[in-house]
Image (cartoon, helix red, strand yellow):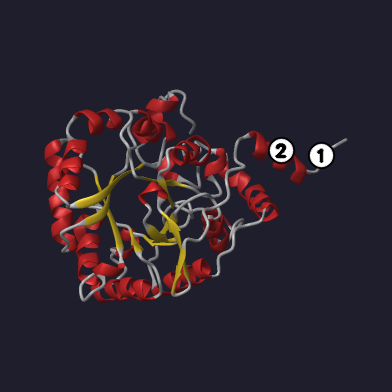
């Protein structure tokens, strides 16, 4: 008997280990926005997380950025993403201004730190606290583990000691880690034994077939009880996956939200996109198996070489070449 294409895909997905657990149950609703529990922290965070990079982009004026952030909070978004590295500090500075006038108390605030040693980690943490105008950051994540030497640096050169000291001093509450090009680097961060509270990774319709965090890292994170934050649901800026026309932006976001994640961080660079994503999150219901398989079938031709996930293939090109053995002689032209 010849299998229909849909049946073949279903078997392939199951065999590849992609049939994961259902998304966490809604723990609370605030102004219609679903909240989920952030892993073993027990914190309740909005299904939609406001991405800090886009909100600090040069296409927005200071006033537009601040207005969008406050609009998001008023609409029920309580989870804000940021990083020391975003736009030379502009993202953190604007977020600090937006969180005045009582808004700080309404937000679970996360930022990220690229320090790989004692001095850099401490300097970046102090700068983030100053820019954000806060005494306490709810979640500080080690940012962008994207090179083979970085797990060893973070564990051995003092960065973790700085974060633990900051937690003991009440400057941060939880500690997490992020990465986006090779799952094995994030896996090593987990396997070395530090009890991370959260992990942030790319989870989208193209990830499943190429260097897949959904297959290789998500199950490990769930087993450890980490709060999982999905990112790059559109394939990175400026929306590489929906640009293909095969999968719509709302399908991309729904797919990520239907995974066993606590929240999905989305870059929203206009009031229109912000409002659309908030409306989607408030009306969200998990994709059915048939809907998920349909999306995966349509996205598969986009997925096989990683071209719709440029952070895996184009960023940090020297690492890609090193990991895959590319040389000028054998690299494709």
> Where's residue 193, x and y in %?
33, 30
Residue that sits furthest to the right in the current view: 1
Q: Is residue 4 left or right of residue 157?
A: right
Element carrying mark 1 = loop
Q: Going 18% across and 36% down the picture, which residue do you hit?
A: 161
Please tell me in which quadrant of the rendered image residue 154 appears: top left
Mark closer to the chain start, 1 or 2: 1
Q: Is residue 139 left or right of residue 123?
A: right
Question: Which is closer to the viewer, label 1 or label 2?
Answer: 2
Q: Nearer the viewer, residue 169 or 14?
A: 169
Element carrying mark 2 = helix
Q: Residues within 10 Å of mark 1 (few under 14, many from 20)?
A: few
Q: Nearer the viewer, residue 75 or 243?
A: 75
Tell me whether the residue at label 1 lies in contact with that at label 2, contact meaning CB atoms closer than 8 angstroms. yes
**In this view, 241 is above or below 29:** above
Q: Which mark is residue 3?
A: 1
Q: Nearer the viewer, residue 50 or 295?
A: 50
Q: Going 50% across and 44% down the picture, which residue do you hit?
A: 307
Q: Going 14% across and 48% down the picture, which residue do you hit?
A: 169
Please tell me in which quadrant of the rendered image residue 118 appears: top left
Q: Which mark is residue 262?
A: none
Tag 2 residue: 11
CA distance for labels 1 and 2: 10 Å
**In this view, 155 is above or below 56:** above
Please tell me in which quadrant of the rendered image residue 177 appears: top left
> Where's residue 95, x and y in %?
24, 65
Q: Residues within 10 Å of mark 2 (few under 14, many from 20)?
A: few
């Amino acid at each position: 008997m010849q299998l229909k294409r849909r049946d073949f895909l279903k078997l392939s997905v199951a065999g590849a280990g992609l049939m994961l657990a259902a998304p966490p149950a809604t723990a609370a609703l605030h102004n219609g926005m679903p909240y989920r529990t952030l892993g073993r922290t027990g914190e309740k965070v909005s299904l939609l997380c406001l991405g800090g990079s886009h909100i600090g982009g040069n296409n927005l004026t200071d006033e537009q950025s601040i207005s969008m952030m406050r609009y998001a909070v008023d609409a029920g978004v309580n989870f804000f993403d940021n990083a020391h590295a975003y736009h030379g500090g502009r993202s953190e500075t604007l977020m600090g201004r937006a969180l005045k006038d009582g808004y700080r108390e309404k937000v679970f605030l996360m930022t990220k730190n690229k320090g790989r040693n004692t001095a850099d980690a401490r300097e970046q943490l102090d700068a983030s606290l100053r820019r954000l105008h806060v005494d306490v950051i709810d979640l500080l994540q080690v940012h962008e583990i994207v090179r083979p030497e970085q797990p060893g640096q973070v564990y051995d050169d003092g960065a973790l000691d700085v974060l633990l000291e900051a937690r003991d001093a009440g400057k941060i509450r939880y500690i997490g880690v992020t990465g986006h090009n090779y799952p094995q680097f994030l896996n090593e961060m987990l396997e070395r034994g530090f009890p991370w509270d959260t992990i942030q990774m790319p989870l989208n319709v193209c990830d499943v077939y190429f260097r897949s965090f959904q297959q290789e890292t998500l199950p490990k994170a769930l087993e450890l009880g980490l709060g999982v934050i999905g990112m790059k649901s559109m394939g990175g800026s400026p929306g590489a996956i929906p640009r293909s026309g095969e999968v719509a932006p709302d399908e991309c976001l729904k797919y990520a939200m239907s995974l066993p994640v606590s929240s999905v961080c989305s870059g929203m660079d206009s009031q229109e996109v912000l409002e659309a994503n908030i409306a989607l999150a408030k009306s969200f219901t998990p994709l059915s198996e048939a809907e998920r398989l349909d999306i995966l079938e349509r996205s598969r031709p986009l997925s096989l070489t990683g071209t719709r996930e440029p952070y895996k293939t184009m960023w940090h090109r020297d690492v890609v070449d090193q990991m895959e053995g590319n040389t000028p002689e054998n690299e494709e032209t």
